[in-house]
Image (spheres, rainbow, N blue to C red):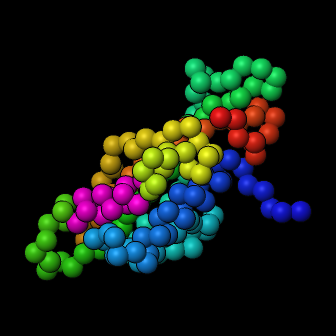
Amino acid sequence: MPLTYTVEERIARELHRRLRLMLSSTSYQTKVRSVIRPTRLGNFTPDHLQIVLTMGETVEVDELMYPGNPVGLARELTFNIHCHLLTDENSSTAIDQEVSQFAADVQKAVCIPAATWHTFDGNAIDAAWKAKELINADGGIDGVNLPLTVLYRVSELDPYATRL
């Protein structure tokens, strides 16, 4: 029997796939070195030009629920896309410029294909970028967290079944 993933996991895998395309692409100014979805124990060390993708909070969206039996549960899941930079202390380029460029490249990569990026391969209803959260580590890793909320709907009885 083939392995089946929940709707949340299918969205996460599609997001991860899009970010991994940055590794070999020449379409971006930021030359990403790694894209990681951490295990329970972490399995990574923060590094320069690294993206770390994690799932955040999931909340139910009552006004978008589908009535019926079973109910179509509308949920909004936040993904945190941490973009790490460890720049040269002697660099003449402003860290704000590098952070902004990295964030822009990540947003560009996630939003492909432009017309349907927000559906995550037919698993979601909508997606929206939230306010950037700067990562400032005095003398350590700098960067930005790009929260992305994804709205999706599943069957009340089956979190593997998409209800669009």
Quadrant where the N terminus is found in the figure: bottom right
Residue 61 visible to the viewer: yes
Q: Please tell me whether residue 13 is drawn above or below residue 59 in the rendered image.
A: below
Give the x, y percent position of residue 61.
58, 27
Give the x, y percent position of residue 22.
42, 70
Residue depicted at x 79% and y 39%: 158
Q: Is residue 68 left or right of residue 47?
A: right
Question: How many labels, in total?
Answer: 0
Q: Which of 133 and 15 lies nearest the eye of the viewer?
A: 15
Q: Is residue 11 left or right of residue 36?
A: right
Quadrant where the C terminus is found in the figure: top right
Q: Which of 114 and 137 lies nearest the eye of the viewer?
A: 114
Residue depicted at x 68% and y 23%: 66
Residue depicted at x 75% and y 42%: 161
Q: Quadrant of residue 156?
A: top right
Q: Which of 137 and 13 lies nearest the eye of the viewer?
A: 13
Q: Is residue 78 left or right of residue 121?
A: left
Q: Is 25 a magenta residue?
A: no
Residue depicted at x 65% and y 54%: 10
Q: Which of 157 and 124 lies nearest the eye of the viewer?
A: 124
Q: Is 101 a magenta residue?
A: yes
Give the x, y percent position of residue 141.
32, 69
Q: Is residue 2 left or right of residue 102?
A: right
Residue 78 visible to the viewer: no
Give the x, y percent position of residue 31.
34, 75
Q: Quadrant of residue 42?
A: bottom right
Question: Which residues are drawn in magenta?
Answer: 98-111
Q: Please tell me whether residue 51 is drawn above or below residue 77 in the rendered image.
A: below
Q: Please tell me whether residue 27 is drawn above or below residue 148 in the rendered image.
A: below
Q: Main secondary structure of the magenta part?
A: helix
